[in-house]
Amino acid sequence: MSVDELRAGMRGYGLTVFSGMRPERFEVEVVGTLRNFRPQQDLVLIRTTHPILAHANTVGGMSGSPIYIEDKLVGAYAYGWEFGNEPIAGVTPIANMLNELRRVRRTPAGMIPGSSAPLPIAGPSASAGAVGSVGHTLNALTTRRQASRAPIATAHGSLQPLAVPFAVAGFSQGGLRFLAEGLEPLGLVPLQAAGTGTPGVIPAGTPEHFEPGGSVSVQLVSGDISGAGTGTVTWVHGDDVLGFGHPMLELGEVALPTALSRVSWILSSSRRSFKIAEPVRPLGALVQDRPSTIIVSERGQAPTVPIRVQIQGNDPSAHNTWNVRVAYHRTLFSRLVGGAVITALETAAGDTTDAGYTLEARVHTRDHGVLRFSDVGVVTGGPSSLSPLNMSFFEGIERLTDNAFQPVRVDRVEVDVALRWQREFYYVRNVALSQAEADVGQTVQVMVSLGVHAGRPVTRMIPLRITREMAGRELEIELSSGKEAVPDMAEPEDIDDLIRNLTTSYPNDALVMSVRMPGQAAVIRGRALYNLPASAMDALRPAASTDGAEALINAQHTVIPMGRFMIGRDRVRLRVRDLHD
């Protein structure tokens, strides 16, 4: 039934799941129609009648519940007011939702959108994907979505899409908080209000297909922990399923795993009531995430990536091995992985005791081999205080899956964390030289005094050979921790350059001695060149082109393994006598 046929006072019904897996009926009355509520979209206001809705009012998770007048489908229950104390909801017209089925897909055949992965999605209506990934970082997307979803500041609030309850299970508080920071601005509200279900076990009586009024979940995380956004199916046509009546994340063409879900309870809240639900049968893939609807293909298959976190050096009775599978979308992937790692550390090793750690991560890619990342550090608040934002592998995954050069497919991620329950680190106290002046050919000893927690200072001697290039100079010698020293690298020009940069760093358990040398240095075509004469720079940087070398500080770097996490830096100067002195 079209919006033009509706009149205030007309009565009908809706379908949704209040408990379990089968839809139930609730009564509705048309209140009125808001013309052009959204661009090119009207909104039908309805009053609902049901014992649960009498006190729950509007309910997150009911988004998509089909609304019928005279047994004809009008649209999807989709909008409400926060803090509203009446069961008044907004309905997205079915015509706007059906229009999305006719949308021409932009992405090349054989590509999965959002994942940057050349994998097919089964089904005639799902052969698409996004090759480019520039400009869609999580930060940029959340900023845009916050602006588009923010209610207009009025005394009585604003009619807005019902937030999708993102029910999570098995997450620690820190993991949930980390996840919420990335997902809540997109309209997903993480709720510790679900279960993970029993892996591989589908409850008896579970439907085999989506049905109008039934629950549909978009499952971003599964395994030892779970996370799924739940809404309701509006209409089913063959393999195509329409739902929500508003976007989930408004990602456009996408490929995210979906599932049938079971509702345990509807929690009434003065701010916004919501369904407590958990996925029970994986089925299909979300292929369109549009302003008026989501579209699920029952035969769709979305890419997911297994994540394994192994903790060593911990109490053997703890749950030290975690296996999780997360959706592979370039915008969401790193945040989902980070939430899983935090949960594993916080749950298995939640002590606030000082601890040293070594984190080794292996990111298995389909076309670029295994990328290895290593972090060594000390945490005074215990392993649970570790943040992925300070881990090199997290930055590597974030930049790799959202790079500007070409799609990269991640097949699996393995993270091994070795714990040592003590505050083991060195910090640089001071630096001294065995002599204030030196001649060419001599070896000067650089003496570094290192502080040790609850111990006496340690002195390390580092030899520095004086070469002819140093003659007549006053050298600046800097000693710094590997974490603070940054290797000389050029801006990446292709995916191989990017991978090299992401996997190149000085060890955190090493000292780096940098000696500033005479002459010049530059990076060009991804390579660093040192000890260049002045004339070389003129040739490498032609005046008529910007495609040339970039100047570097000409320095000699020496890495000294220390076996402990290093902190701090210091510098000293050495005068090298001229050869003719």
Image: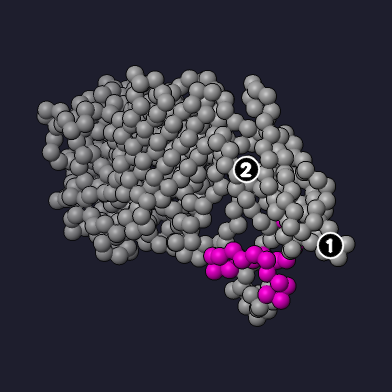
Q: Give the residue at mark 1.
A: 578
Q: Which mark is residue 356?
A: none
Residue 527 appears in the figure: yes
Q: Amino acid at mark 2?
A: Leu
- Which residue is rendered at x = 70% and y = 50% of the image? 464
Front one among 449 and 290: 449
Residue occupying the far right of the picture: 581
Q: Amino acid at mark 1?
A: Asp
Per the model, the C-alpha gap separating discs 1 and 2 is: 29 Å
Residue 314 sits in quarter: top left
Q: Residue at x 64, y 21 (%)?
A: 454
Q: How is the image coloured?
A: one colour
The residue stretch that appears in magenta? 516-536
The quarter of the image holding the C terminus is: bottom right
Say if mark 1 contacts mark 2, CB within 8 Å. no
What residue would you read off at disc 2?
511
In the rendered image, residue 197, in percent from the top left (x then y), is placed at: 24, 28
Q: Label 2 crowding class (10 Å Cα cut-off): few <14, some 14-19, many 20+?
A: many
Instruction: Indicate the position of residue 534 as horizontal and vertical percent values.
Output: 73, 72
Q: Secondary structure at mark 1?
A: loop
At x 28%, y 49%, the residue is: 303
Can residue 53 be seen?
Answer: no
- Pinpoint residue 353: horizontal percent, then vertical percent: 52, 20
Q: Does residue 407 lie above or below 153 as drawn?
A: below
State the image quarter where residue 116 is shown: bottom left
Disc 2 secondary structure class: strand
Q: Is residue 38 magenta?
A: no
